[in-house]
Amino acid sequence: MKTYVKLELAEARAMVAAALRKAAELNVPETVCIADEGGYPLALERMDGARITGPQIAWNKAFTAAGHKRSTHLFNVPPNGPALPGNEAFGIQWSFDGKFAVFVGGYPIVVDDQVIGGVGLSGGNGEQDTACGVAALQALQDLLGSKHKVIVQADIKK
């Protein structure tokens, strides 16, 4: 039997708060979604002025990152990004009724080497979404302290 860490609402809210603080610092209206290991939202917030499409896009990114255990932008990194034309997963973005996101802004939440969820962001450019996503991951590491190890980076593949 394997024991595992489970993401809870308090941690998800702390991650959202950190991402929104970073978005405010960057002056970009973001939507942030923190999903559980199944890709379902635990917390989702849209800043004032953020696009109305943001919640669905952020959820799609969190869903994809959690379910496929990799940062969403890695699907399209040349030359071997699996979703690029001619590569093994070309067309995967049409999976799950179009819910599979293969562009920047989705990051798996990896704690103690286990994927326990995903964070998705929508509203900024790639660099801004990445900065907000890394801020969310750092907030989780800060919250958990030395008890657990969180991968805090943009390029995550498990």
Image (cartoon, helix red, strand yellow):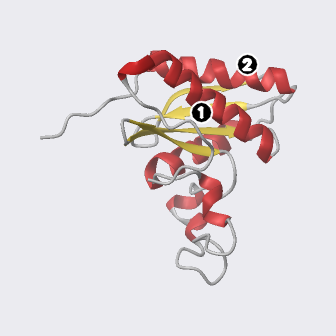
The residue tagged 1 is 33
Quadrant including the N terminus:
top left
Q: Residue furthest front?
A: 146
Helix, strand or loop status at disc 2: helix
Give the residue displayed 62% in from the left and 84% down from the top: 86
Give the residue displayed 43% in from the left and 35% down from the top: 36
Give the residue displayed 61% in from the left and 45% down from the top: 106
Helix, strand or loop status at disc 1: strand
**Residue 122 visible to the viewer:** no
- Residue 38 position, x and y percent, is 39, 43
Tell which tag, 2 or 1, sits nearer the viewer: 2
- Quarter of the figure with residue 13: top right
Going from N to C along the chain, the mark reached first, 2 or 1, is 2
Along the line of sight, the residue nearer the viewer: 82 or 80: 80
The answer to whether 32 is drawn above or below residue 78 in the figure is above
Give the residue displayed 60% in from the left and 47% down from the top: 61
- Residue 48 position, x and y percent, is 81, 21
Relative placement, left or right, of 127 versus 67 is right
The answer to whether 95 is drawn above or below residue 51 in the figure is below
Relative placement, left or right, of 128 versus 142 is right
- Residue 114 position, x and y percent, is 36, 42
**Residue 152 visible to the viewer:** yes
Relative placement, left or right, of 55 versus 42 is right
- Quarter of the figure with residue 83: bottom right
Disc 1 marks which amino acid?
Cys
Q: Residue furthest right?
A: 27
- Quarter of the figure with residue 18: top right
The residue tagged 2 is 21
